[in-house]
Image (cartoon, rainbow, N blue to C red):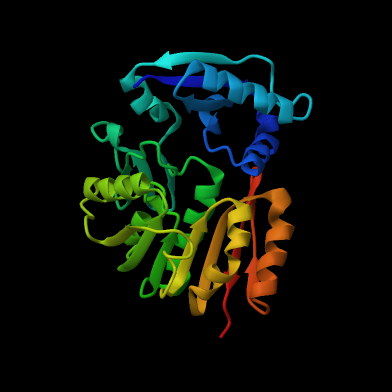
Amino acid sequence: MAVYELKSPVVLAAIGALEELLAEREDQRLMVLEDKPSARAWLTGYFESAAEAETAWKELQGACPAGLIGGECSVRELPDMDWKDSYKIHFKAWKFGSLNWVPVWERETFALPAGEQVLWLDPGMAFGTGNHETTRLVVERLVACQERQGVSGRVIDAGCGSGILALSAVKLGFRDVAAFDNDPEAVQVSEENAVLNGLAGTVKFFTGDLVTGLAGRQAELVLANIQADVLMRFARELCAAVAPRGVLVLSGILAGELAQVSAAFGAIAPGWRAESRVMGEWSDLVLTRGD
């Protein structure tokens, strides 16, 4: 089946506002991809026909404030191999602390520093390379929790994408890790990444949403890197999944949305200690249950 790629350059200063607009429109066919080393970004999307791509572009132009996106857009047919591998140009190796996240196609050339660990990843089209601020915010919180509280607690990764957070937890020493996604393809990618790292069976990956995936489950550390409106809609389920004295790490929140998300969770979990950080256009929200 032919696949058509829509692509338009995006000014870096407009990334946050454009991502917020795409989240509001809930059009999952379009996304912003940023290549940090070259300081360039593009609006991209993949469609079954050129006409569908052009219609999506016109609809987005009509919804955008003046100046948010340019007038130039290209649509091209991708060979099957280009479509499957197009994500690779946007995934670069990175590290935090002693843990490195590296594309599996760099396995033969990557030199792991002495005393450090590596998580090999092939995210496919699932979200989660670590190159996006939302994932980095959660990873850094995960490492901080491991250093502060040890690794005896249970971990739930809600919306696992490529499996990067759940598998990172295992690399850090956590042994009771469950992860789910409402997209069966993401669950498959997560399981494949577990095999790549010799971690098959160390994470319970399964298909579920924020109701079915959390039902009957609790953990000392709950991770959810999902867009803000979804987090608020399921705030009660997320808070209920946090064990006494546990921690809930939320990401996927634009900095401008933080106050609204904090208020929504504060109403569900009054008295929980809250803290947050901003990275680029994005923020996290970390809630600690006190009882």
Please provide percent x and percent y for residue 98.
38, 53
Image quadrant occupied by the C terminus: bottom right
Image position, residue 105 (x, y; %): 28, 32
User: Which is nearer the eye, 39 or 154?
Assistant: 154
Q: Is residue 209 left or right of residue 207?
A: right
Q: Left or right: where does residue 150 sit relative to residue 268?
A: left
Q: Residue at x 35, y 26 (%)?
A: 85
Q: Position of residue 109 (x, y in %)?
A: 27, 31
Residue 113 in sight from this viewpoint: no
Q: Nearer the viewer, residue 103 or 237?
A: 237
Where is residue 187 shown, x and y percent of the image? 34, 50
Would residue 85 be found to the left or right of residue 269 on screen? left
Locate the N terminus and report the quarter of the image it occupies: top left
Residue visible at 57% across and 55% down in the picture = 251
Q: Is residue 34 visible?
A: yes
Against 194, is 132 above or below?
above
Q: Residue furthest bottom?
A: 291
Q: Please name the residue shown 20% across and 52% down the image.
A: 198
